[in-house]
Amino acid sequence: MSLAEEQHQPPAPAVPAAGPLPDAVTEEELMNSGHELPDIYTCPLCCQPLALPARKHSKYKSCCMKMVCHGCIHASRKRGMGKMCAFCRTPTPDSDAAALALVRKRVDAKDPEAIGFLAGAYYRGNHRGLQQDIPRAIELWTEAANLGDLHAHFNLGRMYYFGKYVEQDEARGVRHWQHAAIQGHPESRFTLGIHECDERNHELAVQHWMISAKIGCEQSLNEIKGIFMKGHATKAQYTEALMGYQNALEEVKSPQREVAKAYFNGSD
């Protein structure tokens, strides 16, 4: 897979960049940092790292902007607390408008996760009663990124790299991914590997994927396996990545989560 193959966005009027170009990141800093998942990938209740992809195994709570794992959500429901947030005990909003009001409350408090969440709502449009507003989404994602939101860096990276609704600027996109990757953001690290592979920098690509595979990114492990089959990675590298990935899987397991997995899979 290449980054070009991921681009399916139809042409649209481009808008200028919302902020200055992010600072450059040295290769040493890029490769020596971000080898652990950041705190946003830890369930605030059981304090275990979240399985990746996090959105598949957990849920954002609009009241507190915490990502709570399915295991804790299911356990909370079994205790009769299904109508409130498993973390902050706020009653579950009964409408999109009510949920959006909770998000805006966190935005007013300058919560970077909430600002990034609201940006996504504006970007998609027709979500929680909001009309699509790309300039507003970019403005909010830029604010969230400046406050340290790694998902915002990742989303801005995709927009600028591909020129989605903005003037295309691959260098700006890569720098956003780099800023998130050095703080442990697995999607950004994986995408940097794809970028380097597209540039035929296979050694750098493998280094990126090994880092993200060891924190639980299955996509990265699959890319290493594929590039190993083509002769661009060694057997030792693939073995190291596989062992690291398996260790990451063990760290996110718990009896509570196994019970929840059966429940949520059955309710899909």
Image: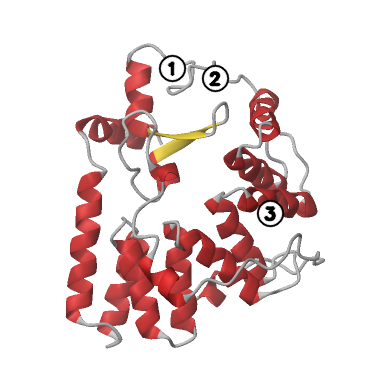
Measure the C-alpha gap from mark 1 to mark 3.
35 Å
Judging by the rendered image, the residue that carries numbered circle 1 is 82
Residue 39 % position (x, y): 41, 43
Residue 143 % position (x, y): 69, 49
Q: Secondary structure at mark 2?
A: loop
Which dot, 1 or 3, sits closer to the camera? 3
Q: Is residue 101 above or below residue 229?
A: above
Q: Are dots 2 and 1 in contact, CB under 8 Å? A: yes
Q: Is residue 108 above or below residue 233?
A: above
Give the mark, 1 or 3, whose residue is nearer the N terminus: 1
For residue 217, side relative to residue 174 (left or right): left
Q: Is residue 248 above or below residue 160?
A: above
Measure the C-alpha gap from mark 3 to mark 2.
29 Å
Q: Quadrant of the C terminus?
A: top left
User: Residue 161 sits in which quadrant?
Assistant: bottom right
Which residue is found at the position 20% from the left and 54% from the top? 247
Give the mark, 3 or 2, whose residue is nearer the N terminus: 2
For disc 1, the neighbor class at 10 Å (few under 14, some 14 to 19, many from 20) is some
**Which amino acid type is shown beneath numbered disc 3?**
Thr
**Which amino acid type is shown beneath numbered disc 1?**
Gly
Measure the C-alpha gap from mark 2 to mark 1.
8 Å
Q: Which mark is residue 244?
A: none
The residue nearer to you, when weighing 127 against 137, is 137
For residue 85, side relative to residue 164 (left or right): left
Residue 111 % position (x, y): 61, 37
Judging by the rendered image, the residue that carries numbered circle 2 is 92
Q: Which mark is residue 142?
A: 3
